[in-house]
Image (cartoon, helix red, strand yellow):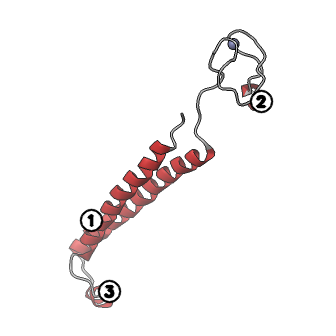
Amino acid sequence: MASQASKRVTKCPECYAPIDSRHAKTCAKCGAQLYYPRRSLFGVGILWLFFGFNAVMLYRVLRQGIEVLSSLTSISVADRIRHGAPENSAGYELINLAGSWFIGAIFIGMLVLMTRPR
Ligand SMILES: [Zn+2]
């Protein structure tokens, strides 16, 4: 099994020259790439936020979609009086949700691109 510790390069894989700096990206002797760029911890967090946001919004839109379908078939008068909502409020809510999903996905997606590994 490959241990995590083996990923830390102390010798150049190309010319076997010892690597002085732990943060060196390339070999000082031959210029070989020592590791591939990775996302920062913040970048990984943003990525998870992006996935989480989409999962939550998908759930909410699906649930609201069911709400719209059920409101089309059985509109509770008591519910309408309680919420003071127009007949197709579930539909508007669904459009609002989809809109905020779209805007949020673009916004967080931009953050994902900005925190892309260099
Ligand atoms: Zn080298």
* Residue reaching furthest to the front: 28
Question: x%, y% of residue 22?
Answer: 75, 29
Pair 1/2: label in front:
2
Give how far apart the Cα atoms at labels 3 and 2 are: 59 Å
Give how far apart the Cα atoms at labels 1 and 2 are: 50 Å
Element at label 1: helix
* Residue 7 visible to the viewer: yes
Give how far apart the Cα atoms at labels 1 and 3 are: 18 Å
Instruction: Name which residue type carries label 3.
Output: His
**Residue bearing the label numbered 1:** 95
Element at label 3: helix
Q: Is 88 situated left or right of 34 in this image?
A: left
Above/below status of 14 relative to 91:
above
Residue 34, numbered circle: none
**Residue bearing the label numbered 3:** 83
**Residue bearing the label numbered 2:** 5
Above/below status of 42 relative to 28:
below
Q: For ligand 1, give the image quadrant.
A: top right
Q: Viewer-proximal residue, 36 or 59? A: 36
Label 2 packing within 10 angstroms: few (<14), some (14-19), many (20+):
few
Element at label 2: helix
Instruction: Name which residue type carries label 2.
Output: Ala
Question: x%, y% of residue 8?
Answer: 74, 27
Location of the C terminus by quadrant is top right
Label 1 packing within 10 angstroms: few (<14), some (14-19), many (20+):
some
